[in-house]
Image (spheres, coloured by chain):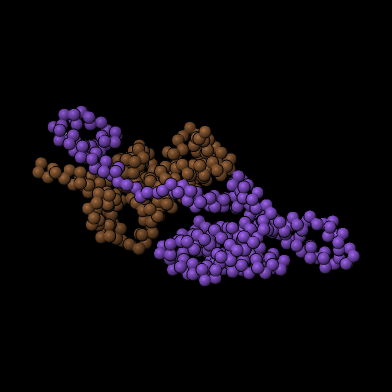
């Protein structure tokens, strides 16, 4: 019989490596997906998956058995991704000095981010890359993770209204980029 | 009739507000919602890079030794004690052999036969684990992407531990006259020291370290030495390792 996640957690807590391994095997690919959506980069996503499980292991005593392990793990992955994005921002800031404010208000894509191919896949990836880190996070949390707005606010450390607005900005940017692709025949209306 | 603004439309889509009444009555806003949902469906349809069936296993392999580190930290003191014990026993053995008159050497050795054996077993196990650790750290450095900076800050305390134990084992090996172990351990020590001081390796520093590991064949030497280090309780230790995390 398959061991449930909760049973595996409780055995991992007692130091059963195989039980923790089972959890890694069961969830790593799903965690990769959320990490990739958050970071937009495969290498970073792999690092986030690894860090997520390390944190999960360290914090496993804090997991409440009533909770859903997958949800709990996803939250950790989101926080790891945010940490990575933020540390990178800090790092990049050192090199851009005062140019920050100009960057923040500019919606223009960076030259190397312009996608020349017309393929849908690339268009969507490119559209996601136009989002700021906060916008992407808020969007991934609301859209893919189904996290309530209040909690998104807590995760990002912003007010509920600001969180709501960030989600909205993200969706609007995506719509602006991708709308031409979903109704190519309606230019005459 | 005032139309829904974009924000209200998005809130409605995610169930954070209810604009059903207006949408029911207004074809224009209903069409905008449809477009919005088509866009989001496109985002849903976008493929995430594929991670194959082997990914969970690979991830576990990446994770495993990092998880072990926790247990190893607590074992560090035991290892240090074991090494010290081994040194004392090894020293005692030498002393005894030197001092014992020819006639009495045999019975004396027989009477205390178990002590030196246990000592060298403890040492062999401890050195073997140390070699495992060092090999993993060097492998990670050797395999890192030289085009990127490598953040080794999380490895710093581990590298410090390794420097400490490396010194103990190198000195023990020298005292016991095991030149083979001593030579490999003194080869890897500078690399470990460098790692214990570095928070972040620039791609240049990383390439330099990789060159050193490669040119001195450090990983190869470590592996050969490790495979020749007989560990009486190794399987038992490996089996218990994760359980005592
Ligand atoms: Zn309307």
Q: Nearer the viewer, residue A177 or B49?
A: B49
Residue A88 image position (x, y, % from top left): 38, 56
* Residue sitting farthest toward the bottom: B215
Above or below, comparing residue B53 to residue B138 in the picture = above
Residue placed most toward the observer, B236 or B134: B236
Q: Say which colour chain A has.
A: brown
Residue B130: percent from the left, percent from the top? 61, 59
Reply above or below: B176 against B39: below
Is residue B158 at all visible to an observer of this figure? Answer: yes
- Quadrant assignment for the C terminus of chain A: top left
In percent of width and height, residue B172 lies at: 69, 64
- From the viewer's perspective, tell me whether residue B176 is left or right of residue B135: right
In the image, is residue B108 above or below residue A189?
Answer: below
Rendered location of residue A138, percent (x, y): 33, 44
Chain identifier, colour purple: B
- The residue at the point 25 percent across, 60 percent down is A111
Identify the residue at image location x=87%, y=59%. Answer: B107
Q: Residue furthest left?
A: A188
The answer to whether residue B161 is seen in the rendering is no
Q: How many marks?
A: 0
Residue B126 lies, with reference to residue B189, above or below; the image says: above
Instruction: From the viewer's perspective, tell me whether residue A81 is left or right of residue B196.
Output: left
At 42% from the left and 45% from the top, the residue drawn is A29
**A103 horizontally vs A185: left or right:** right
Query: Residue drawn at (23%, 55%), measured in percent from left and top?
Result: A117
């Amino acid at each position: 019989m398959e061991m449930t996640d909760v049973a595996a957690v409780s055995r991992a807590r007692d130091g059963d490596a195989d039980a923790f391994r089972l959890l890694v095997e069961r969830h790593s690919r799903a965690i990769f997906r959320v990490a990739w959506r958050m970071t937009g980069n495969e290498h970073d996503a792999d690092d986030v998956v690894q860090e997520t499980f390390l944190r999960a292991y360290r914090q496993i005593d804090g997991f409440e058995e009533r909770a859903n392990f997958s949800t709990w793990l996803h939250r950790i992955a989101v926080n790891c991704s945010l940490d990575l994005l933020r540390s990178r921002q800090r790092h990049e800031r050192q090199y851009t000095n005062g140019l920050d404010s100009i960057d923040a208000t500019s919606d223009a894509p960076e030259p190397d981010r312009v996608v020349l191919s017309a393929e849908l896949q690339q268009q969507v990836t490119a559209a996601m890359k136009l989002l700021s880190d906060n916008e992407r996070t808020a969007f991934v949390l609301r859209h893919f993770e189904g996290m309530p707005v209040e909690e998104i606010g807590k995760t990002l450390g912003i007010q509920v209204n600001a969180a709501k607005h960030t989600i909205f900005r993200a969706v609007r940017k995506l719509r602006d980029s991708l709308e031409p692709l979903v109704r190519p025949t309606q230019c005459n209306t | 009739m005032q139309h829904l603004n974009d924000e209200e439309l998005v809130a409605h889509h995610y169930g954070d507000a209810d604009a059903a009444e207006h949408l029911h009555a207004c074809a224009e806003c209903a069409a905008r919602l449809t477009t919005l949902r088509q866009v989001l469906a496109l985002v849903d349809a976008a493929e995430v890079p594929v991670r194959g069936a082997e990914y969970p296993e690979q991830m576990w392999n990446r994770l495993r030794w990092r998880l072990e580190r926790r247990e190893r930290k607590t074992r560090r003191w035991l290892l240090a004690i074991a090494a010290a014990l081994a040194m004392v026993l090894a020293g005692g053995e030498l002393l005894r052999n030197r001092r014992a008159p020819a006639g009495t050497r045999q019975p004396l050795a027989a009477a205390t036969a178990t002590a030196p054996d246990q000592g060298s077993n403890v040492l062999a196990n401890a050195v073997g684990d140390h070699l495992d650790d060092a090999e993993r750290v060097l492998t990670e450095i050797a395999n890192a992407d030289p085009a990127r900076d490598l953040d080794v800050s999380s490895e710093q305390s581990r590298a410090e531990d390794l420097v400490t134990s490396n010194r103990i084992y190198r000195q023990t090996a020298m005292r016991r006259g095991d030149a083979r172990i001593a030579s490999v351990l003194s080869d890897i020590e500078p690399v470990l020291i460098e790692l214990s001081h570095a928070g972040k390796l620039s791609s240049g520093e990383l390439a330099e370290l990789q060159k050193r590991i490669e040119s001195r064949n450090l990983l190869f030497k470590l592996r050969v030495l490790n495979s020749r280090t007989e560990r009486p309780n190794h399987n038992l230790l490996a089996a218990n390792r994760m359980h005592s995390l």
